[in-house]
Image (tube, helix red, strand yellow):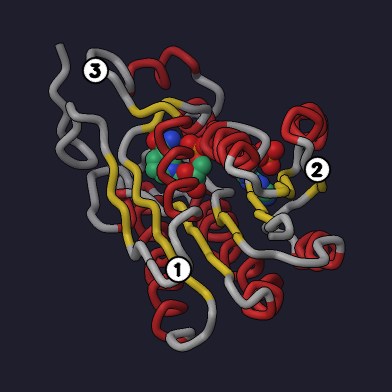
Amino acid sequence: MSTRTAVVTGASAGIGAAAARSLARAGFHVVLGARRLDRLTPLAEETSGTALTLDVTDADSVASFAERVPECHVLVNNAGGAWGVERVEAADEEHWRWMWETNVLGTLRMTKALLPKLVDSGDGHVITVTSIAGHSVYPGGSGYTSAKHAQAALHETLRAEHLGDPVRLTEIVPGAVETEFSVNRFDGDTDRAAKVYEGYQPLAAEDVADVISFAATRPSHVNLDRIVMKPRAQLDGKTFHRE
Ligand code: NAP
């Protein structure tokens, strides 16, 4: 069997980087996309993959990225994140715009750009990393939860629109994962970010990556629609058992 190609967005850190490693170990040729090429290049060497700059908020960047991907069997829509924790009455539109541009429109642009190649492959697979924030809400989370809800709705719509096409759709729905996510959310405040993960064992990026690879390596008639995964000590977006 010829090598299958997996594109991973947001592969320069966290879940995306771990997913790239895991998919490469599973035998995929990985194409790594993110804005920070300096981080992608060593990972591409390590995984014998390809590093390409990608800004999912920029239509031209997405178009030139897609042009350089001759074939695609798996697309992992992972680029994204949260910015801020303001209540609705104090919502910062710049934060909202960033979250919607990256998580929602980024997923839309990447999927539009690569879907023809995924279908043409005869066995395509779109794996979208949403969040439990895409299926519930919490105080101070409206910008992120609304974006993740929209991203989840976009993903689920594709499942309906492509029923009958040779393309699978899997939504990965993680709870708390210790990555740079919270540092970014809190504008680089590492102490505040560390508190998010205090008193319990959060998921690691590798835990999520394992599940992404598991979904991608099922036989092609098996569609894992949605996989929700949380730390054992997490009930929902705001309830944790902390020691
Ligand atoms: P992370 O460590 O902050 O990584 C985010 C990745 O997204 C980075 O590689 C970043 O790369 C990339 N990215 C951001 N903006 C981008 C853009 N405009 N174009 C291309 N790439 C961009 O966070 P993470 O935890 O791994 O998050 C990955 C995904 O999991 C996100 O969609 C997040 O919402 C979701 N998630 C995270 C958690 C959690 O608790 N950590 C829970 C549920 C869901 P560059 O900066 O180099 O572009």
> Height in image: 49 above or below 204?
below
Name the side, left or right, on which 121 lies relative to 76: right
- Tag 2 or tag 1, which sits nearer the N-term? 2
Where does residue 216 sit, x and y in percent of width and height? 50, 55
Mark 3 belongs to which amino acid?
A: Tyr
Q: Are marks 3 and 2 in contact (CB under 8 Å)?
A: no
The circle drawn on residue 51 is 2
Separation of residues labelled 1 and 3 (CA atoms) = 32 Å
Where does residue 189 sit, x and y in percent of width and height? 50, 19
Separation of residues labelled 3 and 2 (CA atoms) = 35 Å
Element under label 2?
strand
Residue indicated by mark 1: 169
Mark 2 belongs to which amino acid?
A: Ala
Q: Residues within 10 Å of mark 3 (few under 14, many from 20)?
A: some
Where does residue 206 sit, x and y in percent of width and height? 47, 30
Mark 1 belongs to which amino acid?
A: Leu
Where does residue 163 sit, x and y in percent of width and height? 43, 85
